[in-house]
């Protein structure tokens, strides 16, 4: 999950803050996720509490809280499980788990990391200047003083020690 992408547990929330705009979560939903993760003074993606506890924390009515939570649940960003007592009756407590939201954030973070990696290695041929192009069998003088002769197939790009790319056209 997200914890495997980032080394520090506190960075989990920072990564979620970076990518939550790309999900269907609202500002209130993100505030609820922050609250869930810090209720127990350690980063946990779940909490067991009553609607009244959530309403008291966010200064909203219980009806508003239910509406927000059901919206998050229907979007697939939150799992809500009723707590059952020993007699099999529902208690006033619910178990709120934001793991689906964090999984979605982890997928977005991995996709973003892959795109950044692809951008690093993508070469736009129109950005190559004539001074960067070498002809086959040209003599190349490297910064360390060694001379190398290039004999590569046409259309090959060679990465030079100074960070430039050479095209074999």
Image: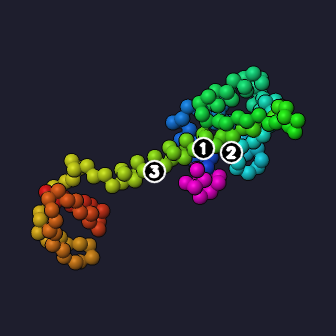
Observer-nearest residue: 165 or 35? 35
Residue 120 is covered by the magenta coloring:
no
Badge 3: how crowded within 10 Å, few (<14), some, or many (20+)? few
Quadrant for the C terminus in the image: bottom left
Q: Residue 102 carries which label?
A: 1
- Quick check: can you spot residue 72? yes
List the residue tagged with mark 3.
113
Tell me the element at label 3.
helix
Comparing marks 2 and 3, which lies closer to the viewer? 2
Residue for point 55% across, 31% down: 24
Give above or below for 143 relative to 112: below
Mark 1 burial class by Cα count in 10 Å: few <14, some 14-19, many 20+: many
Q: Label 2 vs label 3: CA separation? A: 23 Å
Which numbered disc flags the more N-terminal residue, 2 or 1? 2
Q: Which contiguous range is marked in magenta? A: 1-11
> Helix, strand or loop at disc 2?
loop
Mark 2 or 3, nearer chain start: 2
Residues at badges 2 and 1 in contact (C-beta under 8 Å)?
yes
86 is higher (above) or lower (below) than 67: below
Query: Mark 3 vs mark 1: which is more N-terminal?
Result: 1
Q: Label 2 belongs to which residue? A: 45
Q: Residue at x 26, y 73 (%)?
A: 143
Q: In this view, does 148 lie to the left or right of 63?
A: left
Residue found 60% across the figure and 47% down from its top: 14
Q: Using the image, tell me which numbered label, if any, was put on residue 90.
A: none
């Amino acid at each position: 999950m997200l914890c495997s992408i980032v080394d520090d547990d506190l960075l989990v929330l920072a990564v979620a803050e970076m990518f939550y705009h790309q999900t269907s979560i609202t500002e209130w939903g993100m505030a609820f996720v922050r609250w869930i993760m810090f209720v127990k003074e350690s980063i946990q993606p779940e909490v067991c509490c009553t609607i009244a506890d959530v309403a008291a924390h966010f200064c909203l009515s219980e009806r508003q809280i239910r509406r927000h939570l059901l919206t998050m649940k229907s979007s697939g960003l939150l799992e809500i499980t009723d707590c059952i007592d020993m007699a099999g009756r529902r208690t006033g407590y619910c178990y709120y788990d934001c793991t689906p939201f964090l999984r979605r954030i982890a997928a977005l973070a991995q996709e973003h990391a892959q795109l950044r990696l692809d951008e690093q290695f993508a070469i736009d041929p129109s950005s190559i200047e004539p001074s960067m192009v070498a002809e086959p069998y040209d003599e190349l003088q490297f910064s360390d003083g060694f001379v190398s002769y290039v004999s590569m197939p046409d259309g090959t790009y060679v990465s030079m020690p100074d960070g430039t790319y050479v095209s074999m056209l």
